[in-house]
Amino acid sequence: MELKKYTTTILLCFDTDLAGDVAARRGIEIADKAGFNIKVIDFTLVKRTAGDSQAVAFDKAKDPAELIKSDPKSWEKSCCRGDSDL
């Protein structure tokens, strides 16, 4: 796989509906067979600290595209965090 020339880790993020679940499972299977380290991004609960109070808010988005459009910084945090190793 040519992608392995550039990275050993793949971050996956799909919609939370049935089609997204099927796509995620297939993507994980393919990446695993190719020998990649796999991280899954959970965009449904994104932690943010609000102001000086250090309060934590959880944002929900229906899909990754919605979160990217509405709150790019939270998307970046989700990607950097990489919620789980598979």
Image: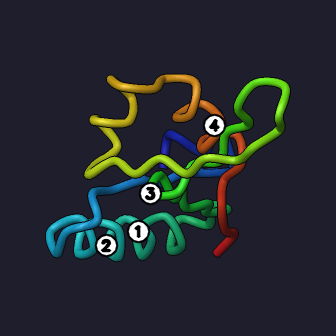
Q: Amino acid at mark 4?
A: Lys
Given contact means CB atoms under 8 Å apart, are the residues at marks 3 and 1 in contact?
Answer: no
Q: Earlier in the sequence, mark 3 or mark 4?
A: 4
The mark found on residue 30 in the picture is 1
Q: Taking 75 as reference, is 26 above or below it?
A: below
Q: Residue furthest front?
A: 53
**Is tag 1's residue or tag 4's residue first in the polypeptide sequence?**
4
Q: Position of residue 75 (x, y in %)?
A: 52, 34
Q: Are marks 2 and 1 in contact (CB under 8 Å)?
A: yes
**Mark 2 and 4 residues: CB-CB less than 8 Å, in contact?**
no
Which one is in front in this view, the residue at disc 2 or the one at disc 3? 3
Element class at badge 3: loop
Q: What amino acid type should be assigned to the residue bearing mark 2?
A: Arg
Q: CA distance from mark 3 to mark 4?
A: 31 Å
Residue drawn where x is 55% and y is 61% of the image: 40
According to the picture, the residue beneath numbered tag 3 turns out to be 44
- Amino acid type for the residue under numbered disc 1: Ile
At a point 42% along the width and 53% down the height, the residue shown is 13
What is the spatial separation of the Cα atoms under label 2 and label 1, in whole angstroms?
Answer: 6 Å
Of 25 and 8, which appears nearest the observer? 25
Q: Nearer the viewer, residue 52 or 9?
A: 52
Q: Which amino acid type corresponds to the residue marked 3 in the rendered image? A: Thr
Report helix, strand or loop for mark 4: helix
Q: Which mark is residue 26?
A: 2
Question: Which residue corresponds to the image point at 75% horizontal and 43% vertical from the top-left?
Answer: 55
Disc nearest the viewer among 2 and 4: 2
CA separation, marks 2 and 3?
20 Å
Residue occupied by mark 4: 5
* Mark 3 vs 1, N-terminal side: 1
Q: Position of residue 45 (x, y in %)?
A: 52, 57
